[in-house]
Image (cartoon, grey):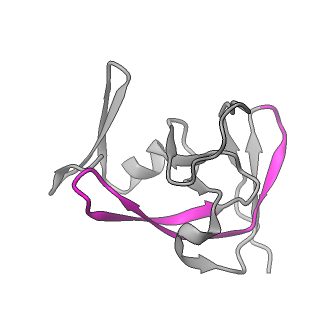
Amino acid sequence: MENKEDETLLMMVHDNKNKLEVDIWYLDIGYSNHIYGSKSFFSYLNEDYRTTVSFGDHSKINVMRKGDVQIKNNSDSIEIMSNVFYVPDLKSNLLSLGKLQEKGYGDTIKNGICEIYDSKRGLIA
């Protein structure tokens, strides 16, 4: 089954000198989706989901599934990121600031540090 949703535009830079660290997320300040490259970190996967992601250079990559990924936050609690795209060939994991804001999380970026807040629990990352 192919899902014909709107394509996602992604702007990012990758440095080939560094290997992918599967538990590291890079913050994507553009509005896109959370994207992860390691299938083993998903607690749930929709095996039928397919779409594409377009990069700033107009190249495209296939999204093979989407699902839920569990992330440990600053207080060692588990946050569940839903509707995360699984892209096996992706060299970096991306956390969408736009999607976090859409879910009600707040953020501040100051002096190169981004802090993410939950309205009830305070600082989470």
Above or below, 66 against 105 in this view is below
Query: What residue sits 65% from the left and 34% below the top?
Result: 12
On screen, residue 32 versus residue 117, left or right, reads: right
Tell me if residue 30 is in the magenta stretch.
no
Q: At which x and y percent is residue 63?
A: 73, 61
| Quadrant in the rendering for residue 114 | top left
Q: At which x and y percent is residue 86?
A: 65, 63
Give the dominant element type of the magenta stretch: helix, strand or loop: strand
Above or below, 61 against 17 in this view is below
Query: What residue sits 69% from the left and 30% below the top?
Result: 15
Q: At which x and y percent is residue 27?
A: 49, 39
Above or below, 74 against 11 in this view is below
Query: What residue sits 64% from the left and 46% below the top?
Result: 20
Q: Residue lying furthest top in this view? A: 111
On screen, residue 80 versus residue 51, left or right, reads: left
| Quadrant in the rendering for residue 62 | bottom right
Q: Which residues are magenta?
A: 57-85
Tell me if residue 83 is in the magenta stretch.
yes
Name the one closer to the observer, 101 or 90.
90
| Quadrant in the rendering for residue 42 | bottom right
Above or below, 58 against 47 in this view is above
Q: At which x and y percent is residue 28?
A: 53, 39
